[in-house]
Amino acid sequence: MSNKLDAKIPEGPLSDKWTKYRSTVPLVNPANKRSLEIIVVGTGLAGASAAATLAELGYKVKAFCFQDSPRRAHSIAAQGGINAAKNYQNDGDSVYRLFYDTIKGGDYRAREGNVHRLAEVSGNIIDQCVAQGVPFAREYGGLLSNRSFGGTQVQRTFYAAGQTGQQLLLGAYSGLERQVGIGNVTMYTRHEMLDVVMIDGKARGIIAKNLVTGELERHFGHAVLLCTGGYGNVFYLSTNAMGSNVTAAWKAHKKGANFANPCYTQIHPTCIPVSGDHQSKLTLMSESLRNDGRIWVPKQKDDKRAGNDIPEEERDYYLERRYPAFGNLVPRDIASRAAKERCDAGYGVGASKMAVYLDFAFAIDRYGKIEANKKNMHDASKEQITEMGRAVVKEKYGNLFDMYKQITGEDPYVLPMRIYPAVHYTMGGLWVDYNLMTNVPGLYALGEANFSDHGANRLGASALMQGLADGYFVIPYTIGSYLSSEIRTKSIPTDHPAFVEAEKAVQDRINKLINIKGKQSPESFHKRLGKIMWDKCGMARNEKGLKEAIAEIQALKKEFWSDLRIMGDADEFNPELDKAGRVADFIELGELMCVDALNRNESCGGHFREEFQTEEGEALRDDENYMYVAAWEYEGESKWNLNPEPLIYENIKIAQRSYK
Amino acid sequence: MSEGNMNITLKVWRQKNKKTSGKLETYQVEGISEDMSFLEMFDVLNERLVSEGTEPIAFDHDCREGICGMCSMYINGQPHGPLQGVTTCQLHMRSFKNGDTIVVEPWRSVAFPVVKDLVVDRSSFDRIIASGGYISVNTGNAQDGNSLPIPKDDADKAFAAAACIGCGACVSACKNASAMLFVSAKVSQLALLPQGQPERQDRAMKMVAQMDAEGFGSCTNTGACAAECPKEISLENIARLNREYLGASLGSTN
Ligand SMILES: Cc1cc2nc3c(=O)[nH]c(=O)nc-3n(C[C@H](O)[C@H](O)[C@H](O)COP(=O)(O)OP(=O)(O)OC[C@H]3O[C@@H](n4cnc5c(N)ncnc54)[C@H](O)[C@@H]3O)c2cc1C
Ligand code: SF4
Ligand code: FES
């Protein structure tokens, strides 16, 4: 295998790598930091934590986001929690176990060195957030509370009701705004990065569009950090926020950054099912619900009875049946495929039959009895027990239940929830080395935008951990290894030809989009792309479908560039134009995802190729031929070169992943 | 596209930009399903406007699940519409009747200038946070998370205040355009926690000063803010802020 990409994993025993790296990485002295400028694109968990921390260290930071405030980044919507190997519950957790669970959960497709570092810093994240005033859930004794997430057998998830992402982001945002107030960060809201500026082979700045005025701006930086989130919206319908997009990462890709494992997408098992063609997004029901909810379908095909009318012995708790060791807490890829399998076989529930039940009746009863005991009510009636049990469930998941009711019109305290898998997260992203730098010098990727830590499947509550690890505890060190050799580089004036040229290219493309003056809206193209991707590169893929998808996407691209209609002008606030640019990039990415899925002749984690499965329908990996990171280098329209980075396991014994 | 059988008359505020004046335009939308969200109805209308060659209506939105605080429509005289405790994006058409006329305007406040149509500029909120809405702790300075037990009740109250999504409905609902509910939610969250104590006085003073500087009105305790707040942030927070502020001005911590 060619090894064009150097992951720069430090030598030495796994558990010493990071410690040793930290104590030997070159430093930048405080006076020099003041003259080094860093551009941070994106202010979700990864970007806000990075921007705040780098500014605290003394760097000059410019931060960008496309929303009207950094507090609104997609991270705000994360519900269930954040993992950390604190072992506060004394249930056998450790850094090694979190490391091991993450590698195994990712179906042995992530780097040992990166993941171990992630587990090592996980505890610091919780400490930092508590210090910022993040109101995590607590026990009556005043100490932090934990719950379980899928793919683990310990309780290591910290949470703030069903609003963990909100509270963590508001913590990072307050740190960021503090630096804005002090003057160490300049914040550009309603700005969209539209290109990376390259000078002498290094990333030296960006072209950003002021979304309110439509003006293009040039910004210089000694380094550029992309913290721009995931690309799940390539499927049109997903649990991501409406604005989440791949544009920043895609522009970087076209400027030379390798895009790694694009086909690894996570389909989350518990989302509210689609209700009609008007649907604009899908709503997640947090994985934490699987702590207390039991998933089932009727044993009888096409059962028309209401859920509550189906007696216990006629229900199939298929996850508990198939995976007794982990039951309802199997990892997401497995739970999603199992739901699809039942629905495809005709056991689905609800009007569309594309749903399964997530039932809280048992939990309500169990909690109700515990409460009764706590209150010494030994002859509590069934109604009293139910009422007390509902109160406990409300405290744990109240906002999720309210959201469900608001969307479906059904009361989940009384009726079992109906759920179905939906696109949720993208493990793929820009290829980065141990320093979080892409193969383009000076260009970094953090958070969901990079590919690094989750292999082929991410475990629940690990994205928030990774985003904050990258921003608070990794980049502040690793960026020194690059910037320490940049201290002599003066700020480059933005009338440099590279800036002028990059801006012109962006302007030309905007003009081109506006001047197509065809008939179809950006939205309609996005919907069509999403359908191709979901049908042929979704929860299950096969060679024939992927080949068809590639042809269909190429045809869609042609149609897009000849029949797009954008209303309004370029020099004003114009969400249609912004959307069009994003859809254009999604179309190109969609093609690469199919190319990657087609190349990977195995099933692993979220990538399930129908041709490669065990007799029981489990994913069948091919470690001999595919134990590598597929990093794709852009070579021109519809042309990519594959740079595989072999994965080396020195500490973990590779096995078929089993949750039985 | 017609998925349902509701026909709605929409009167929507159209305004090209900050500098021009705006006016209400009337649109008929047909075939609306009651499962649609209010914003999905706007999606349907916007798609139609594009196909007719008219500029679609600009509105802010992102998460569409009631948490980012981006959506901001003033619906029939109420911020976020008729339903209690929900944002515009979580409002569904089942809350309306076939044949209804619905008037949709942007937030109205001097501190929230209109950007376009239903989109306003709420950067004043960020500046209020930047003035003091934080605990000054640099990354890496923290002690172990469990070394500071916090009574569950305090943690829960802090969480309830921290649930504010920064949407600005409180300002929009208030006849004085006061931002007291928003500011008090942040001040309360941090004042209720032990970590927030060292900067407690300073924080209240600075945030209130910034709020005044941004041109928000003063609070006359009418309570419209809390009644319209999608996260049901309680008026108790305003009372607490008043105590904090008074305490700080008098130089004591209570
Ligand atoms: C509904 C939901 C629930 C989730 N729950 C959990 C959970 O419980 N636990 C967990 O661990 N994970 C969870 N996740 C996953 C997790 O929330 C995300 O992976 C994570 O928040 C991503 O953070 P980020 O900082 O990388 O990116 P984001 O939060 O997506 O931030 C992206 C930032 O980039 C900016 N941006 C993007 N493009 C541009 C551009 N071109 N120019 C300028 N700015 C740009 C945006 O404005 C934004 O500020 C959940 C995800 C969803 C969808
Ligand atoms: S207090 Fe309520 S209405 Fe005001 S900004 Fe916060 S969430 Fe919105
Ligand atoms: S769109 Fe996020 S709260 Fe409404």
Image: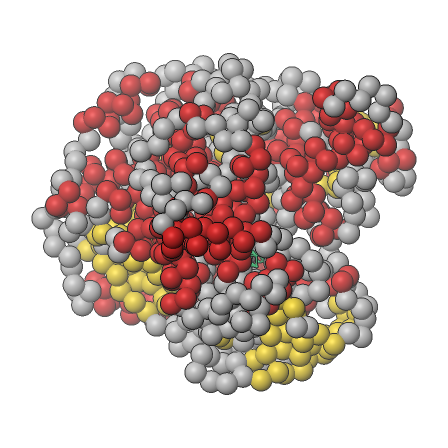
Residue B131 x %, y %: 35, 56
Residue, x 58% and y 63% (percent of image)?
B221
Residue, x 27% and y 54% (percent of image)?
A182
Residue A413 x %, y %: 77, 39
In the rendered view, tell whether residue B203 sits above or below residue A417.
below
Task: Quadrant for the C terminus of chain A, please.
Answer: top right
Residue, x 57% and y 19% (percent of image)?
A153
Residue A292 relative to residue A137: left or right: right
Task: Identify the image's colour scheme: rainbow, by chain, secondary structure or one colour.
Answer: secondary structure
Residue A655 in view: no
In the picture as drawn, the residue positioned furthest to the left comes out as A488
Residue A222 relative to residue B81: left or right: left
- The part of the image, by quadrant, that contains residue A122 is top left
- The part of the image, by quadrant, that contains residue A53 is top left
Residue A127 in view: yes
Residue, x 43% and y 83% (percent of image)?
B19
